[in-house]
Structure formats: structure tokens, C-alpha cells
């Protein structure tokens, strides 16, 4: 961050640091607005996939959900036949996973790109 502030003083590169700071602010605003959705999915995945090492700790579950929002789902690691013995829990976990893919992966990421792109261009002009 300090390096970006130093580069901001060079007139040739000041525009790029302005773009960086504007986009960063907009992304943080969107993530703060959807923090309840992220934490909610982290709790539900921690309950549904309690046997998985990635969801045993709440902090690791939140980080994993953010990574899954970017498209790294690892479907085969979550849904192996050895880990899910109960068919009702298996169906519920698949439904929650599908909702995560639709809401977080498609809607939220496209919304974030659209908001950041729209607001970033308006503030820079």
C-alpha cells in the first residue's frame, strides 16, 4: 500500500493508482454488503461437511467459501460416497451447494464486477 502511495506521486502513473484505489474501495463495499451471505454459507457448510478438514474451523470455512465464490468448487472432494452416509443430509448438502454456485458464483461475482466497473468509471471521469 505504501508503494502504491509513492507511485501516486509520479504524474505518469497517478491515474493507475487512482484506478486501483477506486476499484479496491468498491470491492470492499460490495463484500461488506454481502458478509452475511458469506458467513451464512460458511456456517451451513461447516455443519453439513463437518467431516471435511476445510470446514472444521469457522475462519477456514469463511476463507474456503470466498475461494469457492471465485469458482474453485472442488465438487469431488465434498461429495464422496464414503463421507456422506445419510441420504437426507446428502440431499440437503447438494441443494446448499447448488444454491452457493448460483448465488455466490454467478450472481454475486457478476454483480460485483458490474458495480465495480460502473462506479469505477464514473469516479475516475
Image (tube, helix red, strand yellow):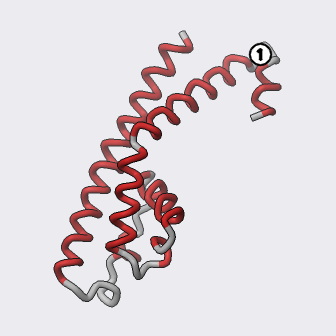
**Residue 112 at what x, y percent from top left?**
41, 35
Judge left or right: residue 103 versus residue 56. left
Q: Which residue is mark 1?
A: 12
The residue shown at (81%, 17%) is 9
Q: Residue at x 33, y 64 (%)?
A: 44
Q: Position of residue 105 (x, y in %)?
A: 35, 50
Q: Relative to 6, is 87 on the left or the right?
A: left
Rendered location of residue 47, percent (x, y): 35, 72
Between 71 and 5, the one nearer to me in the picture: 5
- Measured along the vertical axis of the image, is residue 86 above or below residue 10? below
Residue 113 x/y as whole percent = 43, 34
Q: For this rendering, which residue is in front, 80 or 60?
A: 60
Count of labels shown?
A: 1
Q: Is residue 62 above or below residue 28?
A: below
Question: Mark 1 Cα within 10 Å, few/some/many (few <14, many 20+)?
Answer: few
73 relative position to 98: left or right: right
- The structure residue drawn at horizontal position 76% and vertical position 21%, both measured from the top left corner, is 8
Q: Disc 1 on helix, strand or loop?
A: loop
| Quadrant position of residue 1 | top right
Q: Could you say which is closer to the camera, residue 102 or residue 85? A: 85
Examine the rendered structure and indicate whether residue 36 appears above or below residue 115: below
Amino acid at each position: 500500500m505504501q508503494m502504491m502511495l509513492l507511485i501516486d506521486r509520479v504524474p505518469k502513473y497517478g491515474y493507475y493508482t487512482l484506478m486501483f484505489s477506486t476499484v479496491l474501495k468498491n470491492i470492499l463495499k460490495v463484500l461488506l454488503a454481502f458478509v452475511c451471505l458469506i458467513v451464512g454459507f460458511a456456517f451451513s457448510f461447516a455443519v453439513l461437511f463437518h467431516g471435511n478438514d476445510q470446514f472444521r474451523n469457522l475462519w477456514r470455512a469463511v476463507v474456503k467459501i470466498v475461494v469457492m465464490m471465485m469458482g474453485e468448487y472442488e465438487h469431488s472432494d465434498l461429495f464422496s460416497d464414503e463421507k456422506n452416509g445419510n441420504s437426507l443430509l446428502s440431499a440437503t448438502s447438494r441443494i446448499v451447494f447448488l444454491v452457493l454456485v448460483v448465488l455466490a458464483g454467478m450472481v454475486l461475482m457478476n454483480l460485483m464486477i458490474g458495480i465495480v466497473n460502473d462506479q469505477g468509471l464514473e469516479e475516475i471521469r
